[in-house]
Amino acid sequence: MLNSVKHWVGALTEVGLMLLALAIVAALLVGQNLPFFGSVTANIIAFIKDLGANGLVGLIALGFILWLFSKRNLA
């Protein structure tokens, strides 16, 4: 049962990342405010500014987020 939940969470994360990539490309092609996705690029820029404003803590948080996404296994 735990493997089934792990697989579903991994699959949902993968779909979320694909939607994020689609939203970024669509925002670059169409403009900032998309009807379905909203202002994705503005949110990403704000997130990066928040991490940069926090200095070392932001760098550690970014490293932790990257570590979480790199350790995914859908099998």
Image: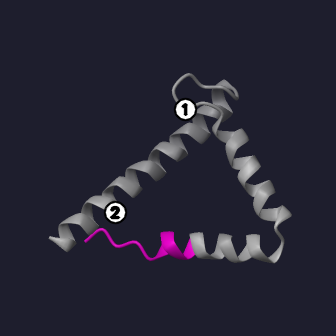
Residue occupying the far top of the picture: 35
Residue at the spot 34% in from the left edge and 73% down from the top edge: 73
Q: Check if residue 40 falls in the magenta segment.
A: no
The location of residue 32, given as percent across then percent down, is 70, 29
Residue 11 percent coordinates (x, y): 31, 57
Residue 50 picture quarter: bottom right
In the image shown, does 4 or 22 lie closer to the viewer? 4
Q: Is residue 44 left or right of residue 53?
A: left
Q: What residue type is disc 2 on?
A: Gly
Is residue 31 toward the left or the right of residue 9 in the image?
right
Magenta highlight range: 66-75
- Residue type at mark 1 is Phe
Q: Residue at x 30, y 68 (%)?
A: 74
Look at the image and tell me in which quarter the N terminus lies: bottom left
Q: Which mark is residue 10?
A: 2
For residue 11, side relative to residue 32 (left or right): left
Query: Judging from the image, what secondary structure is the residue with disc 1 in?
Result: loop
Q: Quadrant of the C terminus?
A: bottom left
Element on which disc 2 rests? helix
Residue occupying the point 58% across, 71% down: 66
Q: Residues within 10 Å of mark 1 (few under 14, many from 20)?
A: some
Q: Per the image, is 74 magenta?
A: yes
Rendered location of residue 52, percent (x, y): 82, 63
The extreme left residue here reads 1
Q: Which residue is mark 1?
A: 37
Where in the figure is residue 57, as x and y percent of width and height?
Answer: 76, 75
Which quadrant holds residue 2? bottom left
Viewer-proximal residue, 30 or 38?
Answer: 38
Q: Earlier in the sequence, mark 1 or mark 2?
A: 2
Residue for point 49% across, 69% down: 69
Q: Please indicate whether residue 44 sits to the left or right of residue 26 in the image.
A: right
